[in-house]
Image: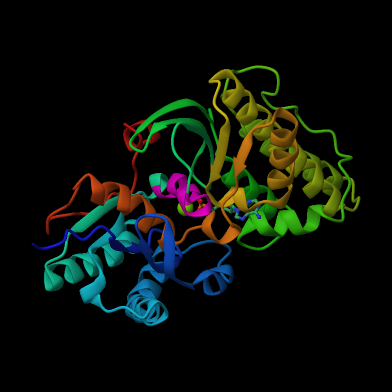
């Protein structure tokens, strides 16, 4: 009798922005290899991501990243059970590189092609951090394009409890960084400056005690811009560290507050976090303190798995693999996918 293979191994391919990432994950939980080749340094010269440079960089790096991942895991394509790839949302030209590459691998090896939604990948990063994590739980999704509190009811069932009414928190970090003359990517640079600053600039309180689980970042961003411009007009020096610290406190405090409230209200015991802003040290500390106080289990993926990576795509791909949710060779890239469609 042929014994059914219980373990399965998925390769995750991610090229939605400026990271060419390939990872190999066993049973949706164990990272066997994880390679990221980033074009961020090249992009920094232009103050942001130039889509065409990103696409070209992916084309050059993708085979290398794949070979490195196979070498690191001591595996060959024969050992891979499916190829998971980010098909959206992201930069169209950048996505097409990963999608076309994954199609080639799937076709050549006759193994399934698994389409992965990038945002669901960010949520699934938590399954790699805590191998016993099971839904239901609340996820705080904080990225360059989204800010939302999500009720993860099952591996495949979600409810958006609230989100931003205007800018995403990562977008606010990037715009404020630009106003302060800090280079791309803005988030980590604001965090670095904030470490030596004081929370001394009066900024809006955000939707702290109101607005349900919603957020709003455009007023905060405008307040920082006005503060900087006023000082410049008066010929006064801008204390970058203090502005960065004050902005960071305003932007983050409300996130921690509402995320914890959602866990309590749903009577869950677990909070997870995902997306690039989840790498922010002040947010991680604030959540750790708040969850300790409320006796909530907090799952904080390592910083490397908060920003874009292939492992989270393989983790989400593993959920879809179990459901046999495969794509055929006509799979195409999608630049924009509304959050409610992403999580439907
Ligand atoms: P994502 O959209 O999930 O790929 O994340 C990218 C966003 O995360 C960008 O807006 C970055 O500025 C932001 N980001 C990355 N690291 C940090 C950090 N340490 N603090 C705040 N924001 C960050
Ligand atoms: Mg991302």
In the image, 321: left or right of 238? left
Quadrant containing the C terminus is top left
Q: Which percent across, then down, holds residue 123?
A: 45, 44
Residue 333 in view in this figure: no
Against 268, is 273 above or below?
below
In this picture, which residue range is highlighted in magenta? 121-131
Quadrant containing the N terminus is bottom left
The scheme the figure's colours follow is rainbow
Residue 329 in view in this figure: yes
Name the residue rendered at 62%, 34% in the picture.
Answer: 218
Q: Which percent across, then down, holds residue 315?
A: 38, 54
In the image, 75: left or right of 111? right
Name the residue rendered at 73%, 36% in the picture.
Answer: 292
Q: Which percent across, then down, holds residue 191?
A: 73, 54
In depth, the one of 144 and 151 nearer the eye is 151
Against 43, is 16 above or below?
above
In the image, 129: left or right of 118? right
Residue 60 shown in magenta: no
Against 6, is 265 above or below?
above
Name the residue rendered at 55%, 67% in the picture.
Answer: 46
Quadrant position of residue 4: bottom left
Quadrant position of residue 48: bottom right
Q: Main secondary structure of the magenta part?
A: helix
Q: Which percent across, then down, holds residue 83?
A: 25, 63
Against 271, is 53 above or below?
below
């Amino acid at each position: 009798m042929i014994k059914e293979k219980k373990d399965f191994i998925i390769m995750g391919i991610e090229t939605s922005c400026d990271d060419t990432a390939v990872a190999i994950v066993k049973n949706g939980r164990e990272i066997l290899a994880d390679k990221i080749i980033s074009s961020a340094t090249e992009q920094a010269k232009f103050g942001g991501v130039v889509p065409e440079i990103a696409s070209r960089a992916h084309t050059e790096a993708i085979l290398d990243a794949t070979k490195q991942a196979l070498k690191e895991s001591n595996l060959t394509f024969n050992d891979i059970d499916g190829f998971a790839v980010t098909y959206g949302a992201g930069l169209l030209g950048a996505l097409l590189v990963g999608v076309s590459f994954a199609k080639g691998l799937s076709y050549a090896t006759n193994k399934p092609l698994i389409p992965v939604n990038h945002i669901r990948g960010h949520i699934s990063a938590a399954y790699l951090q805590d191998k016993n994590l099971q839904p239901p739980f609340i996820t705080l999704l904080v990225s360059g394009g989204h800010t939302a509190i999500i009720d993860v009811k099952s591996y495949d069932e979600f409810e958006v409890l609230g989100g931003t009414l205007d800018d995403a928190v990562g977008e606010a970090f990037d715009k404020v960084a630009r106003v302060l003359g800090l280079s791309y990517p803005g988030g980590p640079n604001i965090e670095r400056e904030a470490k030596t600053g004081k929370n001394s600039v009066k900024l809006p309180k955000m939707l702290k005690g109101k607005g349900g689980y919603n957020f709003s970042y455009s007023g905060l961003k405008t307040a920082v811009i006005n503060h900087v411009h006023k000082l410049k007009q008066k010929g006064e020096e801008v204390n970058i560290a203090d502005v960065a610290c004050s902005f960071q406190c305003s932007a983050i405090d409300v996130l921690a507050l509402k995320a914890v409230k959602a866990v309590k209200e749903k009577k869950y015991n677990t909070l997870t976090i995902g997306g690039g802003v989840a790498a922010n040290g002040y947010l991680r500390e604030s959540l750790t303190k708040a969850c300790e106080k409320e006796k909530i289990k907090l799952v904080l993926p390592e910083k490397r798995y908060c920003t874009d990576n292939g492992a989270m795509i393989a983790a989400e791909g593993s959920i879809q693999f179990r459901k046999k949710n495969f794509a055929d060779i006509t799979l195409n890239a999608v630049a924009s996918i509304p959050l409610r469609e992403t999580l439907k």
